[in-house]
Image: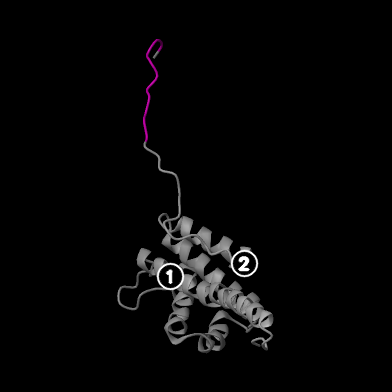
Amino acid sequence: MAGSPPTIKEYLVWPKGIMRDPVPAEVTADLADDYKEACLVLADSPKASAALSRRCLQHLIENHAKIKKPNLEKEIEEFAPTLPSYIGEQVDAIRKIGNFAAHPIKSTNSGEITDVEPGEAEWNLEVLELLFDHMFVKPELVKKKKASLNQKLKDAGKPEMK
């Protein structure tokens, strides 16, 4: 209508953010990017988060553990036994939950497509964090401690650690 004041709508908008600890600096950029994206979409789409977690796991196995097999399942079979059991026992969950995200898998009970639930996508992120700590953070910490001790041994005229 002519002369009517415009309607003003107000919205409360919250910025997107990640409600998890930052990715450790020791983690490579390719993995950190996939992980951060999986975190960012978690609230809006657990399915997308799970798919990104699966992708991150596959990159980690192929590019950092140097295991390349015909599929992720075979890669995990070789990779998981190299990990502490509390991590190795959880790694295949990322693949299985990621498969619910990537493929329409039907429940044998209801016939409905099985979807990824927020707690499952969150679990994937927790397992990736354990992997990052085991494969990147802890080895770097040991390397720094060992270098410090070797300098002290060298200064004392003693043989270095190998």
In the rendering, at what x and y percent does residue 116 appear? 40, 67
Residue 76 vs 123, above or below: the answer is: below
Residue topped by disc 2: 28
Image location of residue 10, percent across then percent down: 36, 30
Residue 14 horizontal side relative to residue 25, left or right: left
Amino acid type shown at disc 1: Glu
Quadrant location of the C terminus in the rendered image: bottom right
Q: Nearer the viewer, residue 11 or 100?
A: 11
**Label 1 crowd bin: few (<14), some (14–19), many (20+), radius 10 Å:** some
Q: How many marks?
A: 2
Task: Find the distance from the CA under tag 1 to the CA under tag 2.
Answer: 17 Å
Query: Is most of the magenta stretch helix, strand or loop?
Result: loop
Q: Quadrant of residue 153?
A: bottom right
The magenta stretch is 2-11
Residue at x-position 56% and y-position 74%? 141
**Looking at the image, which residue is at 47% across and 80% down?**
92
Among numbered discs 1 and 2, the one appearing first in the sequence? 2
Instruction: Residue lying at the far front in this picture: please name it.
Output: 156
Which image quarter is the N terminus in?
Answer: top left
User: Toward the viewer: 99 or 22?
Assistant: 22
For mark 1, give the secondary structure: helix
Position of 160 with respect to 49 (left or right) is: right
Looking at the image, residue 141 sits to the left or right of residue 122; the answer is right
State the image coordinates of residue 11 (x, y, percent, origin top left): 37, 35
Q: Camera-side residue: 64 or 76?
A: 64
User: What x and y, as percent, mark residue 142?
Assistant: 57, 78
Residue 31 tag number: none
Q: How is the image coloured?
A: one colour
For numbered disc 2, what is the local secondary structure? loop
Q: Amino acid at mark 2?
A: Thr
Assess whether residue 70 is covered by the magenta stretch: no
Give the numbered dot on residue 126: 1
